[in-house]
Image: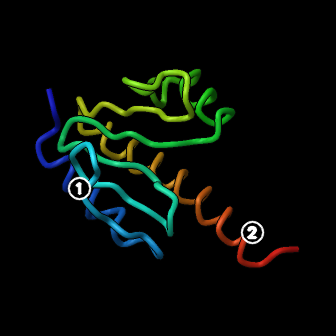
């Protein structure tokens, strides 16, 4: 059962982060980007998909913080199903982790060592 208003709560939290652009996702819902890199996307009040490097993805699945992506289970993508109110907060935390990785990689490209 979806969490009523969960997608909107996630949108309201994420859209405030610096450099974030929100736009319609090609498969429905709303995606969040930093430059050309997608941080994740929300499918209404029921599902959030988030990309990570494979090592991070494996850690999140092992710990139970996320599930393998419903369509691409061997990729770096994870899925967070919004079944309970606490899932919304967990999805925001994971989106923030993806965002931090995206911003960190963007800074590294902008300011080479």
Taking the spot 77% from the left edge, 78% from the top edge, the residue there is 111
**Which residue matches tag 2?**
108
The type of colouring in the image is: rainbow
User: Which quadrant of the structure image shows residue 32?
Assistant: bottom left
> Viewer-nearest of labels 1 and 2?
2
Taking the spot 48% from the left edge, 22% from the top edge, the residue there is 73
Determine the residue located farthest toward the front in the rendered image: 26
When the figure is inspected, residue 14 is found, relative to residue 78, above or below; the finding is below
Query: Residue 85 versus residue 30: which sits nearer the camera?
Result: 30
- Relative to 77, is 54 on the left or the right? right
Determine the residue located farthest toward the left in the rendered image: 4
User: In the rendered image, which quarter contains the C terminus?
Assistant: bottom right
**Which residue matches tag 1?**
9
Residue 83 image position (x, y, % from top left): 23, 29
Query: Element at badge 2?
Result: helix
User: How many residues crowd around disc 1 within 10 Å: few (fewer than 14), some, or many (20 or more)?
Assistant: some
- Relative to 27, is 108 on the left or the right? right
Tally of marks: 2
């Amino acid at each position: 059962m979806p969490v009523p208003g969960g997608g909107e709560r996630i949108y309201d939290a994420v859209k405030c982060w610096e450099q974030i652009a929100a736009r319609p996702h090609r498969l429905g819902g709303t995606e969040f980007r930093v430059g050309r890199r997608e941080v994740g996307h929300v499918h209404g009040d029921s599902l959030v998909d988030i990309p990570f490097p494979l090592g991070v993805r494996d850690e999140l699945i092992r710990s139970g913080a996320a599930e393998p992506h419903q369509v691409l289970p061997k990729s770096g993508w994870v899925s967070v199903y919004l079944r309970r109110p606490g899932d919304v907060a967990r999805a925001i935390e994971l989106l923030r982790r993806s965002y931090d990785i995206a911003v960190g990689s963007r800074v590294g490209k902008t300011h080479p060592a």
